[in-house]
Image (cartoon, helix red, strand yellow):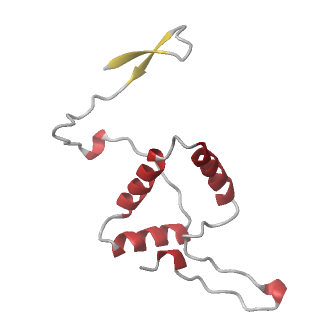
């Protein structure tokens, strides 16, 4: 199925391929009919998500989908867009607060290295 769409200026048309959608009244999706987005997580992040999902009796995919759902419902707020950008930039240097801790090195303070520990934010 090809759907014709106008660009934002309304100056021209372009064609975009779309898969036919499932009947929403029956909601019968097959796994191979769905698009996918890969999310790359550090082990400390993934472990925290998996442990939380297990504690509430669901799969990690359900946790990620619920988080995305909450984010998209708040997307009208300009602060959300800024938070998304800042979170993505921060991810390059630090783990998020909800992730398990990684080994912290305290050599400069003369303390022993910290062992990895489960996130304090996910204690139920």
Residue at image x 56%, y 65%?
42
Residue 88 visible in the picture: yes
**How far across and down, in percent of the image, does residue 63 sit?**
39, 61
Seen as rendered, the residue at the extreme left is: 26
Vertical position of residue 21 compared to residue 27: above or below: above
Q: Is residue 15 left or right of residue 93?
A: left
**How far across and down, in percent of the image, does residue 7 sit?**
52, 16
Q: Quadrant of residue 91?
A: bottom right
Residue at image x 64%, y 47%?
82
Seen as rendered, the residue at the extreme front is: 77
Residue at image x 60%, y 66%?
96
Q: Nearer the viewer, residue 87 or 42?
A: 87
* Quadrant the C terminus occupies: bottom left
* Quadrant the N terminus occupies: top left
Q: Quadrant of residue 32?
A: top left
Residue at image x 73%, y 92%?
112
**How far across and down, in percent of the image, does residue 48 sit?**
48, 72
Q: Quadrant of residue 61?
A: bottom left
**How far across and down, in percent of the image, does residue 31 sit?**
28, 46
């Amino acid at each position: 199925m090809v759907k014709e769409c106008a660009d934002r200026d309304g100056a021209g048309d372009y064609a975009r391929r779309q898969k036919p959608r499932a009947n929403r009244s029956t909601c019968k999706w097959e796994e191979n009919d769905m698009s996918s987005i890969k999310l790359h997580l550090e082990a400390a992040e993934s472990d925290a998500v998996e442990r939380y999902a297990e504690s509430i009796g669901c799969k990690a995919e359900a946790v990620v989908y619920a988080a995305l759902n909450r984010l998209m419902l708040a997307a009208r707020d300009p602060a959300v867009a800024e938070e998304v950008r800042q979170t993505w930039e921060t991810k390059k240097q630090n783990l998020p607060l909800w992730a398990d801790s990684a080994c912290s090195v305290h050599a400069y303070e003369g303390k022993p290295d910290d062992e990895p520990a489960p996130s304090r934010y996910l204690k139920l």
